Amino acid sequence: MSQLFRVPYEEMMKTSINVLTLVGAPKDHALSVTQSLVQAQQAGHTSHGVMRLSDYVEFVQQGFIIPSANPNIKSERGAVINVEGNWGWGQVACKFSVELIAERVNKFGIATVAINSCNHIGRLGEYVEMLAKKSFVALMFCNTGPSVSAYGGKTRLFGTNPIAAAIPSRDGDIVIDFATAGAAEGKLRVAVAAGEEIPNGLVITRDGEATNNPGAFYEGGSLVPFGGHKGYCLSLMIELLSGALSGVHPAMNNAYDHGNGTLLIAMDPDFFVGAKRFSEDIAEAKMRIKQAPPANPEATILLPGEIEVIAQLRNQDEVEIPENIWETVLNLEKSLQN
């Protein structure tokens, strides 16, 4: 198992920015992508942290990411906007879309953005949380490349297809963010790098057999949906809606090439029931959940997003990361400098 290592925040930022600029990212894009990756690392999500730099460098070298591309509005009608990502950095396209949707929600009370030609966007919770901080409710989901079998199947058809939601609250926003596969693919990478096994029920071999070996996925196996047929249905909804409405296409279709077909929906509670009444309802619900007796008297009931907040507080000045993953990032930087 790899030992956990603590890297100064500024060092992690500087190294990651350097890697991205070395493959052609403008400084503002490199900063934006790095902020997203390091924030994910601070929140305890190594699978969406700076380990992704290796993928991004490879995507640039393969021509999937155009490092200097900027997003733009492709078409719009009132509260509905189509954003063209132009196959640039997914994080840049998403932050552009967050600002656009906030403007429209202020005007219409609700708005939707679909992002086309969009590369890997990272942790969805980041973007919905940005909208919650503006006092908006937000929903987001995207499809990804085939890695998950259908319920009852054994071949890769779906992406891990994450879904995220954020609900503003005066004493801490609720942020929900999870893959509809039993585990995000990035978490398998972390387990492989650490030499760890995974619980049965997350991955099947290429023959359709359950396994606790995360490496079986990279030998032709697949992830499976969480929750059996229910997770399968939720993943299918995300696959069809985000893939088809964005123009990226569902992952199992012949027209799908790569990328994250992304949908973002935001609402202003003040438009619906008034900000004060909404805030009071959310506060009471949170209070009743937190005051409910836990099954384990020595534990506490957590709300979605609280684990990430705890990790962020722990990782402000120095950021925790598996040592072997940080070594990979440093070696990547050196290889690009040569």
Image (tube, rainbow, N blue to C red):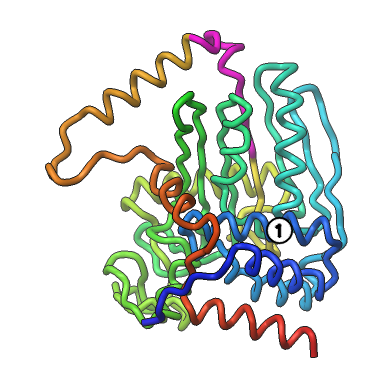
Q: Is residue 208 above or below residue 79?
A: below
Q: What amino acid is at disc 1? A: Val
63 lies left or right of 279: right
58 lies left or right of 320: right
Q: Is residue 196 above or below residue 37?
A: below
Quarter of the image for the N terminus: give it.
bottom left
Residue at the image position 46 percent from the left and 58 percent from the top: 44
Mark 1 — residue? Answer: 33
Q: Is residue 268 magenta?
A: yes
Residue at the image position 29 percent from the left and 72 percent from the top: 210
The part of the image, by quadrant, that contains residue 305 is: top left
Q: Position of residue 187 (x, y in %)?
A: 44, 67
The answer to which of 119 and 151 lies nearer the viewer is: 119
Q: Is residue 132 visible?
A: yes
The answer to which of 146 and 284 lies nearer the viewer is: 284
239 lies left or right of 322: right
The answer to which of 87 and 55 lies nearer the viewer is: 55
Q: Secondary structure at mark 1?
A: helix
Q: Position of residue 27 (x, y in %)?
A: 84, 61
Q: Is residue 113 magenta?
A: no
Q: Position of residue 73 (x, y in %)?
A: 85, 39
The answer to which of 161 and 35 lies nearer the viewer is: 35
Give the residues in magenta: 264-276
Residue at the image position 57 percent from the left and 44 percent from the top: 141
